[in-house]
Image (cartoon, helix red, strand yellow):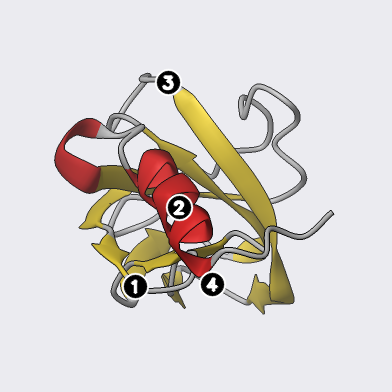
């Protein structure tokens, strides 16, 4: 059942934002579905080396939060999923989503993702 109240949708979106410290999250990338715990197929290596990138959520209206376009260095190959974490390494897995479209890099290079979360 969709949530009819825009104010309630925004309260829920802002609660999602609060999972990370001070409205921040770390964006990770994966070469396949990371699974329910986020631990599978996270990228590694490359030059410059792959690492999760921190961003800050901004509240919208009507049930939306968004982050800025966030660029992550990758080692190349398929990049199929993004994940959200509470830390640069380790940390608590927050969520995942498939990338659309999937990226397939022939060599090391950047991938830019714009995080958006919407409650409907």
**Is residue 61 visible in this depiction of the protein?**
yes
Q: Mark 1 points at which residue?
A: 60
| Residue occupying the point 54% across, 72% down | 107
> Image check: 16 left or right of 59?
right
Which callout, 3 or 4, points to the residue nearer the camera? 3
Circles 1, 2 touching at the beta carbon (< 8 Å): yes
Kindly identify which numbered label has been placed on residue 14.
Answer: none
Give the mark, 1 or 3, whose residue is nearer the N terminus: 1
Circles 3, 4 touching at the beta carbon (< 8 Å): no
| Residue occupying the point 57% across, 39% down | 95
> Image check: 104 left or right of 118?
right
Which callout, 4 or 2, points to the residue nearer the camera? 2
Which callout, 1 or 3, points to the residue nearer the camera? 1
Kindly identify which numbered label has been placed on residue 13.
Answer: 2
Q: Name the residue under label 3.
A: 92
Res. 110 image quadrant: bottom left
Circles 4, 1 touching at the beta carbon (< 8 Å): no
């Amino acid at each position: 059942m969709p949530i009819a109240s825009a104010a309630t949708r925004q309260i829920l979106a802002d609660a999602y934002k609060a999972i990370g410290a001070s409205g921040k999250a770390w964006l990770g990338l994966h070469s396949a579905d990371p699974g329910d715990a986020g631990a599978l197929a996270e990228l590694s290596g490359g030059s410059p080396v792959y690492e999760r990138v921190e961003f800050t959520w901004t509240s919208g209206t009507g049930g939306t939060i968004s982050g800025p376009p966030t660029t992550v260095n990758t080692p190349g190959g398929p990049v199929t999923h993004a994940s959200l974490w509470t830390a640069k390494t380790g940390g608590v897995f927050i969520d995942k989503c498939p990338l659309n479209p999937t990226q397939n890099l022939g060599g090391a290079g950047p991938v830019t993702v714009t995080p958006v979360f919407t409650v409907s």
